[in-house]
Amino acid sequence: MEEYRVLLVDDEEDIRVGISRKMDWAALGFTLVGEAENGQEALELADTLEPDVVLTDIKMPFMDGLELCRILTRRLPASKFVVFSGFDEFEYAKQAIRMNVSEYILKPISAAELSGVLQRLKERLDTERTERQNAEALRSRYEESLPVLRELYYTHLLEGRVPPEQAAERAERLELHFTGGAWVAALGHMDGAADRRELAAPSVQQLLNDNLKLENWDCRAFLYGDAVAVLAAFQGGGSVYPLIEALDRICALAESYLGLTLTVGVGMPCADPGDLPQSADGARSALDYRGLVGAGRAIYIGDLEPDTASSISFEENDERDLTSAVKLGDEGEIRTAVERLVDKVRRSGLAASQCNLFFLELLTCLLRLTRSSGLEVEDVFGTGFTGAVQATDFSSFTAMGDWCLERCLRIRALIRRHRTDSAGRTVELARDFIQKHYGESDLSVERLCDYLHLSPAYFSTLFKRETGMSFTAHVTVVRMEAAAAALRNSEDKTYLIARRCGYEDANYFSYVFKKHFGVTPTKYRTG
């Protein structure tokens, strides 16, 4: 098993040397990855080393151990902290507990005592690691969540949020055996249950599951928002009317058993689960007719709008999937998203002239994505583009797909370039802010992020990726360069230069300066 990483912090070198040499780190399951002689230095090291355990003295110059633990608890929430001190004061122990410190040890520290502490910490770390990695524990939690995950899957299927090519795979992972040659979506609407609304939907769901039993049909009722939905699968070539008759009977049972009026809208059958959103739209439209044909029954959209199937629309999930692929996916994912849309048009069986509305909605999606990404329309669609493009302008659906793919890839390339430029501008703004405020002792990444309107976690990652160093390291470099220039070009006292460079403590300034340049400020000036 991988050894746990330890950072040792103490301002007394003999104590650091004693601890590092006396402990058999490997035998205890640890490795000493770094040492620091004060809290400030430890904070900088922790950003890079990400230790699992921090061993720190309390009383140290520049930043004490409790303040170090307070900051690192926020930055490294999974790390364990051990503090030691030569002061047997209860107040320190109370503060240590508030700082999420795992152990509190009084000096002098014996190898046996520290070994015992590390053994206890290893047990805790092992337990936490095992819990994260234990497949059986994960499987148990997964099985407990299966009912909820299955209902979520049905909801996503109904809303078109499951890519058609993934539908079977996800169903198998959820241990669902829900197959058929044709699929139908139905939606329930309940009246007369205002006094027990929170119980109406579960009651109707139970009524449907208990009574919707049809030969050669596989029906699943599930909660859908404040209502109930039904997904039904049957063999292709069969009729949807047995389902409608069964739902009619259940509407009558709801009146008798539950005292509420249940109306069920039934959509048109579809040949693929990926088309269930269209069937659901038909079910919603069917419910809109309940005032005309009467509530408390099953209403089939095919009886009221026989030509419903002879249309195709660009759904909300179509836009969501295409937008996500362009903004976040690679070229292959974009190609897959476009091919899925073209295949949807092909499967509709409609002529190109009947698909103009679908193409117009797709084009509107691309224009909206262009604008929301801060791009110029002409950069994506070409100079003089007016938007006057129709499905009939293309020789085939393949040609229409190629045109869309080219625009999608162009949008992706421009977004990536915009992000790179934006990251560069952000870092330049940060550098400018640091250059203007490095002389203020309260300069921090949090303060800078308030100015930039970014989260510290995101900014820290961005800044390090763009500059190769952390925010703290960059501020130190700026301050040291300014201090060196002041020492060369003025006769000001060292403590005044320290303050102008953001260091209230002149001793700490001298410590950092020597660490950075290899000589003290005095020797630097005279040398």
Image (cartoon, rainbow, N blue to C red):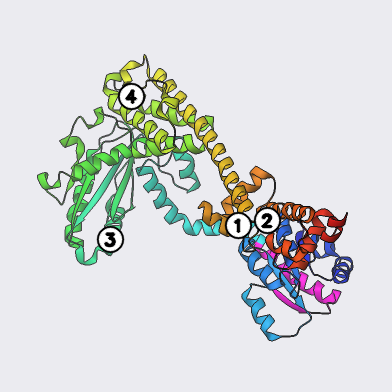
Magenta region:
102-128
The residue lying toward the viewer, choosing from 126 and 413, is 413
> Against 246, is 132 above or below?
below
* Distance between the alpha carbons at the discs numbered 4 and 2: 50 Å
213 displayed left or right of 508:
left
State which mark lies toward you, 1 or 3: 1
* Distance between the alpha carbons at the discs numbered 1 and 4: 46 Å
Disc 1 is placed on an element classified as helix
Q: Which image quarter holds the N terminus?
A: bottom right
Instruction: Name the amino acid, label 3.
Output: Ser
Q: Is residue 127 magenta?
A: yes
Instruction: Name the amino acid, label 1.
Output: Val
The residue lying toward the viewer, choosing from 180 and 439, is 439
* Distance between the alpha carbons at the discs numbered 3 and 2: 59 Å
According to the image, label 2 marks what residue?
Answer: 472
Circle nearer the N terminus (3, 2): 3
Residue drawn at (16%, 36%) of the image: 303
According to the image, label 1 marks what residue?
Answer: 445
The residue lying toward the viewer, choosing from 235 and 401, is 401
According to the image, label 3 marks what residue?
Answer: 203
Circle nearer the N terminus (1, 4): 4
Residue drawn at (60%, 57%) of the image: 445
Cβ atoms under marks 4 and 3 closer than 8 Å? no
Disc 3 is placed on an element classified as helix
Disc 2 is placed on an element classified as helix
The residue lying toward the viewer, choosing from 526 and 207, is 526
State which mark lies toward you, 4 or 3: 4
Residue 382 in view (yes/no): yes
